[in-house]
Image: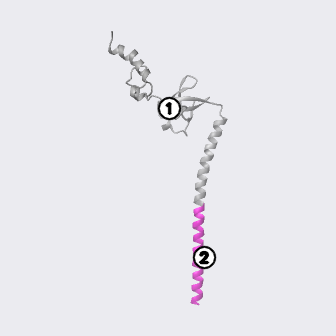
Amino acid sequence: MADAADDERAQALQAYRQKIQQHRELEARVKTMRSQIGELSKQYEKTEDDLKALQSVGQIIGEVLKQLDEEKFIVKASNGPRYVVGCRNRLDKSKLKAGTRVALDMTTLTVMRKLPREVDPAVYSMIADPEDTKDNAPGEENAKVSFANIGGLNEQIRELREVIELPLTNPE
């Protein structure tokens, strides 16, 4: 009798362990499916946003000039005028700094999205930074460039010195 009870108990324990193992496997599958649902939801939202952008009347390209407060920006439109505009709720407003290119809704003039730079990154790095040029004379782009930085133009450098520097250093 005791052996039969022990066998029954061992079988019940074995069945219990199998059920626990099955439960853990199912929990792991549910967890991965939930993460997949999250990723698919994000893809769905992005696709919906893209569709809405394509279906909209049209958009104007503009450039952020200044942020007035938490919600309002001064934007210069590509066609000339400047507007005080609002921003779409889903847009990260911290990324909208002065000089950022944006797309404006044609009818409401709301900032719809941040656009990439129009200028090629290699060219963008050559554009003078306002911080570097703030102490320069008008018309002078970057005073930190010396003749030593310019290579292969010895004849032109000599001509510039004769025409510009010599009359200033030796007025006659």
Q: Is residue 49 above or below residue 161?
A: below
From the viewer's side, name the closer residue of 147 and 39. Answer: 147
Q: Is residue 10 above or below residue 77?
A: below
Image quadrant where one finds the N terminus: bottom right
Q: Residue farthest to the right?
A: 55
Left or right: 152, with 101 as reference point: left
Q: Residue farthest to the bottom?
A: 1
Give the quadrant of residue 51: top right
Task: Tell me the element at label 1.
Answer: helix
Task: Tell me the element at label 2.
Answer: helix
Q: Amino acid at mark 2?
A: Ala
Which mark identifies residue 124?
Answer: 1
Classified by dominant secondary structure, the portion drawn in magenta counts as: helix
Task: Return the residue at label 2.
Answer: 15
- Residue range highlighted in magenta: 1-29
* Residue 150 locus on image (x, y percent): 43, 27
From the viewer's side, name the closer residue of 134 and 172. Answer: 172
From the viewer's side, name the closer residue of 107 and 124. Answer: 124
Q: Is residue 140 visible?
A: no
Q: Classify 10 Å Cα crowding around label 1: few (below 14), some (14-19), many (20 and above).
A: few
Q: Residue at x 59, y 47 (%)?
A: 42
* Residue 111 locus on image (x, y percent): 56, 33
* Residue 134 locus on image (x, y percent): 39, 25
* Residue 142 locus on image (x, y percent): 41, 26
Q: Is residue 8 magenta?
A: yes
Q: Classify 10 Å Cα crowding around label 2: few (below 14), some (14-19), many (20 and above).
A: few
Q: Residue at x 41, y 21 (%)?
A: 157
Q: Amino acid at mark 1?
A: Tyr
The first of marks 1 and 2 along the sequence is 2
Q: Are marks 1 and 2 in contact (CB under 8 Å)?
A: no
Which mark identifies residue 27?
Answer: none
From the viewer's side, name the closer residue of 148 and 87. Answer: 148
